[in-house]
Amino acid sequence: MRRLATSLIALTLASPALADTDYSALIAEKGLAAAAAEISSNGALTPADRFALGGVRFLRSVEGVLQARWQSGVTDDMRMLPIFRLPIEENPNPEPFKPAMVSETFARFLIGMGAANKALSGIPDDADFGVTLRFDDIWFDINTNSARDPGESLLDVAGPMLMGWEWAERDPATPGPVVRFDAADAAWLSAYTHVLAGVSEVILAYDPTESIDKVLKTRAQLQALNMTASAAPPFYDDSFGQFADYAYAVIDALDQEPDAEGLKRAHGHFLAMVSENRRFWQLVEAETDNDSEWLPNARQQSAFGIDLPPETGAMWMAVLDEMEATLKGDLLVPYWRLGDEAGINIGRMFTEPARIDLAGWIQGADALPYMEKGRLITGESWGRFEQMMGGQAMLLSLWLN
């Protein structure tokens, strides 16, 4: 489990650096912003340059989210959002939290994913290069002081989330992994830029700013009442209040007219993710080398010492096929009040979006416009994959992308 979790430390964060020029060392010495500036100033970019630039832009975008959270004092809340779940140090003197912080942060993150993908898109499938990344070199300038402080390394930020209690029991002297990335891995990283861009588009389409503003104003009024009258014990507010606030913000944000064009872009990103991930598995299957691999084929070994079953690629391609068919509406999602011959067309929820009223979806009135007769997704491909991977299926699915 420890080796598995270590291999996944860079799930949403991992990216490469140049091999010919040691950008891994540059990141270690000067940080991600300086590395991005230097790589982009190289002029005519080689495939290795493009891979390094795409990776550093990806990491720089993650760093931007961590910085926004630190500046606003958001350390524990909003764990359902990408990057927001990663642990960071407390800011002793944060700025006042603004309701628009979430949407503004994901708007910048979306731009960053686009910039990373732009660099990666210029890499031909037959490009022959290797880019080595030492994970110990990667750090995030979370507190924006241009220095590497304790708690800012890639492994510090991602390790506790992925390894849990085992992280505290590791040998601190154990070096981080070293991976040699190649052309196939460019497709893997491109797929990750698309899935995170798609999630960002959904968040922005159902902009939560007004809903968060309602939560903050309600909190302030409740606090004022608690200062002047007998009210529910603070324990209940501490233990359940934050969950209630978060749930309300999500439900209220969904119950508004969404940005239809944004959801169409999200749909496109999710389909592109499937396409790029499929391209990755086709490219990696053709590889004949065996050198510090990120995700290996059946004839290779991972740099993390993990042995994947030989059928992993084929099994995951089948999962991708079902995912794509569901996104396109060729397969329908079961609904609790329907039988085996009808379901929800997920694709139309992106192409013909509307406000999402939770009560209406549970009862069926608001879900009805998306119901139709057709074949249902059975989850058979995922079931076979889960059986093959045992209890590690969810973790491995994030690694496989």
Image: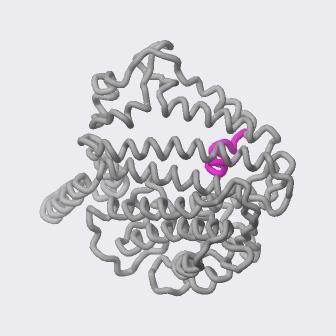
Quarter of the image where one finds residue 28: bottom right
Magenta stretch contains residue 261 = no
Magenta stretch contains residue 398 = yes
Residue 335 as seen in the image, left or right of residue 368? right
Quarter of the image where one finds residue 24: bottom right
x, y (%) of residue 251?
Answer: 30, 43
The relative height of residue 333 versus residue 180 in the rendered view (above or below) is above
Colour mapping: one colour
Query: Does any portion of residue 164 appear in the rendered image?
Result: no
Q: Main secondary structure of the magenta part?
A: helix
- Please give the name of the residue rendered at 72% of the width and 44% of the height, measured from the top-left corner: 282
The one of 217 and 351 positioned closer to us in this rendering: 351
The relative height of residue 328 versus residue 221 in the rendered view (above or below) is above
- Please give the name of the residue rendered at 74% of the width and 77% of the height, measured from the top-left corner: 20
Residue 302 as seen in the image, left or right of residue 237? right
Q: What is the span of residues highlighted in magenta in the rendered image?
A: 390-401
- Please give the name of the residue rendered at 42% of the width and 25% of the height, measured from the top-left corner: 344
x, y (%) of residue 171?
Answer: 75, 72
Number of numbered discs: 0
The one of 265 and 78 positioned closer to us in this rendering: 265
Query: Does any portion of residue 60 appear in the rendered image?
Result: yes
x, y (%) of residue 155?
Answer: 63, 69
x, y (%) of residue 14?
Answer: 62, 63
The one of 296 and 1 positioned closer to us in this rendering: 296
Quarter of the image where one finds residue 119: bottom right
Q: Residue furthest front?
A: 44
